[in-house]
């Protein structure tokens, strides 16, 4: 069952990335949806799950929230130190991000997240087939957007299509690998919750600092883009509500 469920996640991830690859002139709408989806994943899935998984705190603040703030500040420091957005507003629409490596790093983080999705499916199966099915449905439901975001974030930073497709394939394979290796990989609950907090901070920074500003740059229909962002957020609320 874990392999079958992760194989379905493989297909959905590829489908999401291929849709992102074919959008053409409607890129601003795709980016708007991606930003909303990432906000929804952070607010409705990653942070609640991280907080419920860890009772530990430091100086009165839950460890996942400290990890969340750390990741947000860390990626901000990387962007500021590389001067990636030191451009005039009039030049913003035409510029290409100078550091393709940031796109590779972002895509790789999504691949790692997908690997943990597969591990979650396999670990749930060890506790019972019913729990594995519920976890598998949740993973499959959001893996379309995982593939979509992997391709979008990687290509956003100026990486060629071949690199974006390579990371998309790795992202699709990651749940299968994770589910297969679950018997060899054990992640303590506290470590998982800190990881979820870190990943939430990383995603929220990318959504607010890069993807949404890019979506609203020289768009012919700002209202449609804003609607697309809201739709992406509401979609994740609906999906997570169904799979909880």
Image (tube, rainbow, N blue to C red):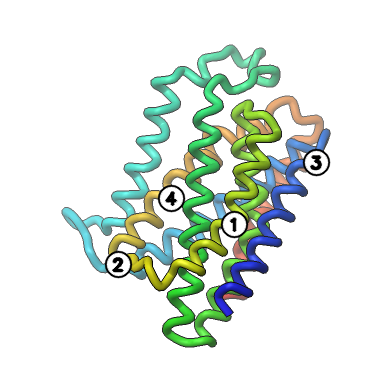
Q: CA distance from mark 2 to mark 1?
A: 23 Å
**Mark 4 highlights which residue?**
199
**Mark 3 highlights which residue?**
23
Residue 110: % across, % down:
52, 49
Q: CA distance from mark 4 to mark 1?
A: 19 Å
Q: CA distance from mark 3 to mark 2?
A: 40 Å
- The residue positioned 74% from the left and 55% from the top of the image is 15
Q: Residues within 10 Å of mark 4 (few under 14, many from 20)?
A: many
**Mark 2 highlights which residue?**
188
Is residue 108 found left or right of 55 in the rendered image? Answer: right
Is residue 25 found left or right of 42 in the rendered image? Answer: right
Q: Residues within 10 Å of mark 1 (few under 14, many from 20)?
A: many
- Nearer to us: label 2 or label 4: 2
Q: CA distance from mark 3 to mark 4?
A: 27 Å
- Nearer to us: label 2 or label 1: 1
Label 2–label 4 contact, CB within 8 A: no
Q: Residues within 10 Å of mark 3 (few under 14, many from 20)?
A: few
Placement of 13 over or under 70, stated as above or below = below
- Nearer to us: label 3 or label 2: 2
Q: CA distance from mark 3 to mark 1?
A: 23 Å
């Amino acid at each position: 069952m874990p392999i079958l469920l992760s194989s379905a996640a493989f297909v959905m991830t590829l489908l999401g990335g291929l849709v992102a690859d074919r959008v053409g002139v409607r890129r601003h709408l795709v980016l708007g949806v991606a930003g909303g989806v990432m906000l929804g994943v952070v607010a409705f899935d990653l942070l609640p799950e991280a907080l419920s998984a860890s009772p530990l705190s430091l100086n009165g603040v839950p460890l996942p929230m400290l990890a969340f703030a750390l990741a947000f500040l860390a990626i901000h420091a990387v962007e500021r130190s590389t001067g990636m957005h030191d451009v005039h507003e009039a030049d913003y629409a035409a510029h290409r991000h100078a550091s393709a490596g940031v796109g590779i790093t972002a895509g790789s983080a999504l691949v790692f997240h997908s690997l943990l999705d597969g591990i979650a499916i396999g670990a749930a199966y060890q506790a019972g087939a019913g729990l594995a099915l519920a976890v598998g449905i949740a993973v499959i439901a959001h893996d379309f957007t995982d593939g979509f975001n992997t391709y979008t974030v990687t290509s956003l930073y100026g990486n060629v299509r071949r690199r974006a497709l390579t990371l998309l394939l790795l992202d699709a394979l990651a749940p299968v690998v994770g589910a297969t290796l679950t018997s060899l990989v054990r992640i303590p609950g506290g470590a998982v919750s800190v990881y979820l907090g870190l990943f939430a901070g990383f995603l929220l920074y990318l959504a607010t600092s890069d993807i949404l500003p890019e979506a609203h740059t020289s768009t012919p229909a700002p209202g449609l883009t804003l609607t697309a962002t809201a739709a992406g957020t509401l979609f994740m609320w609906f999906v997570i509500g169904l799979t909880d």
